[in-house]
Amino acid sequence: MLITRLLTAAVVLPLLVGALLFLPNQYWLACLLPPLLIASLEWAALAGYGRVARWLFAAIVPVSGVGLLYAPNSLASLPVPVPFSLFAYWVSAAFWLMLAPAWLAGKWRVQNALVMGVTGWVVLVPAWLALVGLQAQPARLLTLLGIVWIADSAAYLAGQRFGRRRLAPRISPGKTWEGVAGACVAVAVYYAVLWFMFAPREALFHGLGGIILFAAVMVMSVEGDLFESWIKRQAGVKDSGRLFPGHGGMLDRVDGLIASMPLAALSLYYSA
C-alpha cells in the first residue's frame, strides 16, 4: 500500500506543482475543472443520487464555480467592493467552523437529497475558488498545500507506526491521536524550516500570524478528512472512488484541502 501511494504521489505531485507555478491563471483554472467534476460525481454518488441526478449535480458545481469567478468583481451596492468569491469563503468558513463540527459530534446521517446537494456545493466550490484565486500568490499556495500534504503523510506514517488510541472510532477507525501528534510535529518542523529560510522577506512568517495560519490549516485539514470519512461511512464505502491507486478517489485526495483552503484564502485576503 505504501509503495503504491508513493508511486502515485511521485507522478501526480510534479505535474500539479509544475502547473501551479508555470501555467497562466486561465490554464490553471482549466486544469482544476476536471478534478472538480470528478469530485462532484463522487460526492453525488456518496449522496445516493441516481445517474441523471449525479450528472446534473456534477454540471451545476463547476458551472456555478466559474460563474462566481467571472461574475462582476463586486457588489456595487456595498460601500466597500467585495468579490463574490469572498462570500463563498465566508459560507465555507461558517460551515467548517460551526456546522461540520456539530455534524461530526452528532454523527448525523443525512439522507435528504437537497441538503446533501447544498452541502456538496459548500464543500467543493469555495475550495476550488480558493485554489484558483491563490495561484496569484504561487509560493504561498504551494506553502499551504505543503501543510496539508505533510500533515496527511505524517499522520499516516505515525499512525501506522505508533497508533494506539483512536481519534474517532465511529467515524474513521484508522485515524489515531498518535497520527495527529505526528502531523503536528511534522508541520512544526516544516514551519521552522521555512521560517529560517524566508522569514526576513516573507510577511507570512512575521509575528504569530503565520503560526496561527499553519496550525489552523492543519486542524482544518484533519476536520475535512474526518468529515469525508463520515460521509463515506454513511454511504457504506471505504473510498470515494478508485481514481488514484493506493489513494482512493478524488475526494479522498482533496478532503484536507476542501476545509482548509477557503479559510486560508479568507485569512490571506484580510491580512493583505
Image (tube, rainbow, N blue to C red):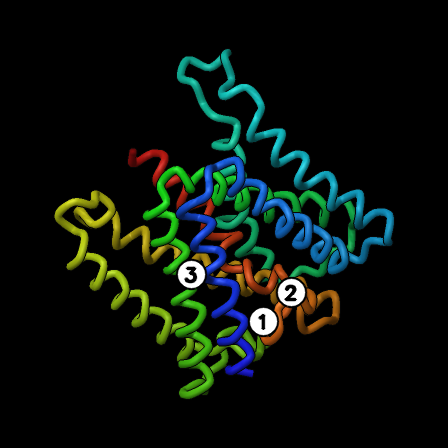
Residue 28 location (% of width, % of height) = 51, 43
- Sequence-wise, the earlier of marks 2 and 3 is 3
Q: Which mark is residue 148?
A: 3
Give the secondary structure at mark 1.
loop
The tag on residue 151 is none
Front in this rendered view, residue 33 or 14: 14
Q: Which quarter shows the C terminus? A: top left
Q: Is residue 153 above or below residue 122?
A: below
The answer to whether residue 23 is left or right of residue 228 is left
The three-letter amino acid code for the residue at tag 2 is: Gly
Relative side of 7 to 214, left or right: right
- For the residue carrying disc 1, how many other residues have a C-alpha within 10 Å: few (<14), some (14-19), or many (20+)? many
At horizontal 86% and vertical 53% (from top left) the residue drawn is 51
Q: Which mark is residue 249?
A: 2
Of the pair 74 and 31, the residue shown nearer to us: 31
Q: Which residue is mark 1?
A: 247
Residue kind at label 1, given as amino acid type: His
Query: For the residues marked 2 and 1, what is the alpha-carbon distance in whole angstroms?
Result: 7 Å
Of residues 238 and 26, the one nearer the viewer is 26
- Secondary structure under the numbered disc 2 in the rendered image: loop
Labelled pair 1, 3 in contact (Cβ < 8 Å): no
Q: Residue furthest left?
A: 200
